[in-house]
Image (cartoon, rainbow, N blue to C red):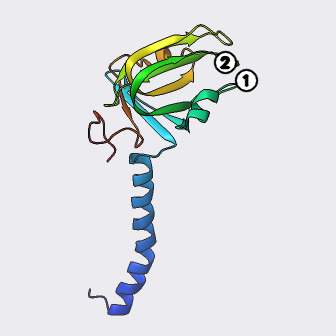
Amino acid sequence: MRLGFSQHLRIAGWLGPLVLSALVSNAAVAGCSEARVALRGDWGTVRFEVEVADTATERSVGLMHRDHLAARSGMLFIYPSLQAASFWMRNTQISLDMLFVDHRGIVRHIHHRAKPLDETFVFGGDSVLAVLEINGGLANDRGITVGSQVQSPLLPQKFAAWPCE
């Protein structure tokens, strides 16, 4: 059966939005977003919705004065260049895991279950470009380990172990 030109237009008009919707939703799931960080390793993959702290002021405040952090949420601290990174828990009321990440998006150190309100410095390393803070104990619960790969468009894609697609 051959279709006329107007029938093609009607079918295209009906299918077009469906195809476009499928492409957009697949891109949203597979693509990178500044508000999302993915981690992967031999243990599997996990994603977190994140707030980004990429200015000195935002990094100095971090997650202070909060009494809750949703299970699949966190804060991603981004530095303008590789540097030594130390954190403390001043005015932070929730236990946190701190994942220290290099320029390739590789987790180089994890500080598990930082104690709320503790002012002891946690040293994360000399060549840190980003730090991901998540709920305390979650790194162990999910199997996240040193060597896990981090995917974020905020990390240099040229060097990324797991670049955005």
Residue 62 makes an appearance in the image: no
Whether residue 59 is situated above or below residue 17 in the rendered picture: above
* Quadrant where the image shows the N terminus: bottom left
Counting from the top left corner in percent of width and height, residue 150 is at 38, 31
Q: Residue at 39%, 80% (x, y): give it.
A: 11
Q: Compare marks 2 and 1 and give the one earlier in the sequence.
A: 1
Kind of element beneath mark 1: loop
Counting from the top left corner in percent of width and height, residue 157 is at 31, 42
Q: Quadrant location of residue 94?
A: top right
Q: Are marks 2 and 1 in contact (CB under 8 Å)?
A: yes
Q: Which residue is mark 2?
A: 94
Q: Of the residues shown, which amino acid type is indicated by label 1?
A: Asp
Whether residue 49 is situated above or below residue 113 in the rendered picture: below
Q: Residue at 38%, 79% (x, y): give it.
A: 12
In this rendering, position of residue 18 left or right of residue 102: right
Disc tally is 2
Kind of element beneath mark 2: loop
- Inter-mark Cα distance, 2 to 1: 6 Å
Count residues near mark 1 (Cα–Cα under 10 Å), then give few for <14, some for 14-19, many for 20+.
few
Counting from the top left corner in percent of width and height, residue 59 is at 57, 30
Count residues near mark 2 (Cα–Cα under 10 Å), then give few for <14, some for 14-19, many for 20+.
many
User: Any mark on residue 39, and which?
Assistant: none
Q: Of the residues shown, which amino acid type is indicated by label 2?
A: Ile
Counting from the top left corner in percent of width and height, residue 17 is at 45, 71
In this rendering, position of residue 36 left or right of residue 19: right
Q: Which residue is mark 1?
A: 67
